[in-house]
């Protein structure tokens, strides 16, 4: 896809990031041996809009999602999933509150052993 293996995303301009997304889309479209017109029709967009996306032009996020869906690439959306994380301090507090052993139930009228 790109010549560099390690992209420094923070150092890239917005235009370069958009171009990278376009290269990604075009690469996967061509790998799947699909035409721009086919993808555009299935995504419900104009072919020139898809061409603009592939060439680093401005498109809406909705358009990008439609194209990702048609190309079966929605898995990349997993990076946007927010996962609850517990802090190490909270984890330590929870561990302290864990039961360490079973206790004798109150009101248990079992006879005492002769031993």
Image (spheres, helix red, strand yellow):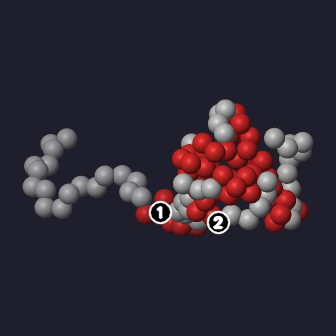
- The Cα atoms of the two marked residues, 1 and 2, are separated by 44 Å
Query: Residue at position x 74%, y 40% from top?
Result: 27
x, y percent for residue 90: 54, 67
Residue 77 makes an appearance in the image: no
Labelled pair 1, 2 in contact (Cβ < 8 Å): no
Query: Residue at position x 85%, y 51% from top?
Result: 7
| The quarter of the displayed image where residue 100 is located | bottom left
Mark 2 or mark 1, which is nearer the start of the sequence? Answer: 2
Q: What secondary structure is found at the residue carrying circle 2?
A: loop
Horizontal side of residue 78 vs 99, given as left or right? right
| The quarter of the displayed image where residue 36 is located | top right
Give the residue pinned by disc 2.
60
Q: What secondary structure is found at the residue carrying circle 1?
A: helix
Query: Residue at position x 43%, y 63% from top?
Result: 97
Give the residue pinned by disc 1.
94
x, y percent for residue 33: 67, 32
Query: Residue at position x 77%, y 61% from top?
Result: 57
């Amino acid at each position: 896809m790109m010549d560099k293996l390690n992209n420094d995303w923070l150092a890239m301009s917005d235009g370069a990031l958009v171009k990278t997304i376009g290269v990604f889309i075009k690469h996967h479209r061509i790998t799947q041996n699909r035409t721009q017109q086919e993808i555009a029709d299935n995504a419900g967009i104009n072919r020139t809009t898809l061409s603009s996306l592939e060439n680093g032009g401005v498109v809406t996020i909705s358009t990008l999602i439609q194209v990702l869906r048609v190309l079966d690439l929605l898995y990349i959306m997993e990076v946007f999933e927010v996962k609850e994380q517990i802090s190490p301090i909270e984890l330590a507090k929870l561990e302290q509150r864990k039961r360490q052993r079973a206790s004798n139930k109150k009101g248990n009228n079992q006879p005492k052993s002769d031993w």
